[in-house]
């Protein structure tokens, strides 16, 4: 329900994420602060699509309060926010389910001014599948760092379509050419096409999206993985803790209950 996302609640969520040096009310700070991505994904994953749209409107309203050197700069900032929220919701749908992501994107579309709507596909649909696979392997290694081999081995073992079995394959943390079939679905579809199909979000912001969706889904193994991955991507302890707190506050307000403790950072 949209009434969950009151201005007071959203202002509180915004305050939870540590600001960088300088004013938090400049256009670049408003666009670049990821609190709204976390909140939007948390509402979407918690099956509250209308509230996701309210988050978007709240950030656009913040941008209306600041001055821009030129109208084209205002448009660029507004478009960046729209694009970032859409991409975050799309990425989260791989985890929370595309029915929820679609409903949130429908809600977002309904409140998006025509000039901020996407007209063409952002992802390069002409890219060869092997290129997506290689991009996915690089992102997987960058996110998981020293834990990449452990997680990849698990994915390879649980189901061949999730990951190419590692029998007769010597696993390399470099994911070289000899291992191009390793982790097919995860590396190619998940990390290559979905998470690194565009450059709209940074690596650490994608980790925030994944961690948030998993918090709302009550999947502690993956929560622990991706809170750690946020740190691997450059998030400070305080920032990663803020992601956890924002996601939990939204999920709790949306009625999510956890069967066990949500992992700490």
Image (spheres, helix red, strand yellow):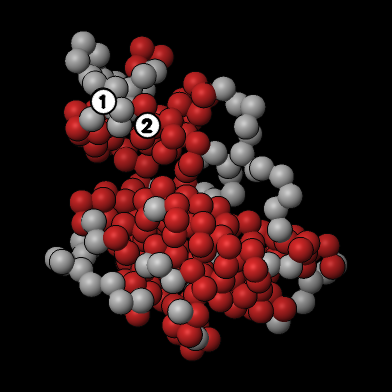
Q: Which residue is mark 2?
A: 185
Q: Quadrant of residue 78?
A: bottom right
Q: Which residue is mark 1?
A: 160
- The foreground one among 238 and 4 is 4
- Badge 2 crowding class, 10 Å Cα cut-off, few under 14, some 14 to 19, many 20 or more, is many
Q: Earlier in the sequence, mark 1 or mark 2?
A: 1
**What is the secondary structure assignment of the residue under circle 1?**
loop
- In the rendered structure, are the residues bearing label 1 and label 2 in contact, judged by CB atoms less than 8 Å apart? no
How far apart are the alpha carbons under marks 1 and 2? 9 Å
Q: Is residue 105 left or right of residue 139?
A: right
Label placed on residue 27: none
Q: Is residue 264 left or right of residue 44?
A: left
Q: How many marks?
A: 2
**What is the secondary structure assignment of the residue under circle 2?**
helix
Q: Residue at x 56, y 71 (%)?
A: 53
Q: Quadrant of residue 188?
A: top left
Does residue 138 lie above or below 42 as drawn? Answer: above
Q: Residue at x 48, y 41 (%)?
A: 194
Q: Position of residue 151 (x, y in %)?
A: 24, 36
Q: Quadrant of residue 144?
A: top left
Q: Is residue 138 left or right of residue 116?
A: left
Q: Position of residue 134 (x, y in %)?
A: 46, 25
Q: Position of residue 207 (x, y in %)?
A: 40, 51
Q: Is residue 29 left or right of residue 94?
A: right
Does residue 87 lie above or below 162 as drawn? Answer: below
Q: Position of residue 14 (x, y in %)?
A: 48, 76
């Amino acid at each position: 329900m949209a009434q969950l996302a009151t201005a007071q609640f959203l202002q509180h969520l915004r305050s939870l994420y540590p600001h960088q040096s300088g004013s938090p009310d400049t256009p670049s700070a408003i666009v670049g602060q990821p609190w709204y991505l976390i909140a939007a994904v948390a509402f979407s994953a918690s099956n509250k699509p209308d509230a996701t749209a309210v988050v978007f409107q709240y950030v656009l309203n913040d941008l209306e309060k600041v001055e821009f050197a030129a109208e084209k700069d205002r448009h660029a900032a507004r478009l960046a926010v729209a694009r970032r929220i859409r991409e975050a919701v799309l990425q989260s749908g791989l985890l929370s389910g595309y029915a929820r992501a679609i409903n949130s994107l429908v809600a977002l579309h309904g409140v998006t001014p025509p000039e901020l709507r996407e007209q063409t596909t952002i992802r390069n649909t002409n890219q060869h599948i092997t290129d997506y696979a290689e991009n996915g392997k690089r992102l997987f290694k960058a996110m998981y760092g020293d834990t990449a081999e452990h997680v990849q081995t698990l994915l390879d073992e649980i189901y061949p379509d999730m990951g190419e079995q590692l029998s007769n394959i010597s696993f390399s943390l470099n994911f070289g050419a000899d291992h191009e079939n390793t982790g097919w679905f995860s590396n190619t579809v998940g990390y290559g096409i979905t998470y690194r199909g565009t450059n709209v979000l940074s690596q650490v912001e994608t980790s925030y999206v994944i961690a948030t969706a998993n918090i709302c889904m009550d999947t502690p193994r993956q929560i622990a993985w991706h809170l750690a991955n946020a740190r691997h991507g450059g998030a400070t302890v305080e920032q990663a803790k803020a992601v956890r707190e924002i996601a939990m506050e939204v999920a709790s307000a949306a009625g999510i209950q956890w069967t066990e403790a949500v992992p700490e950072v």
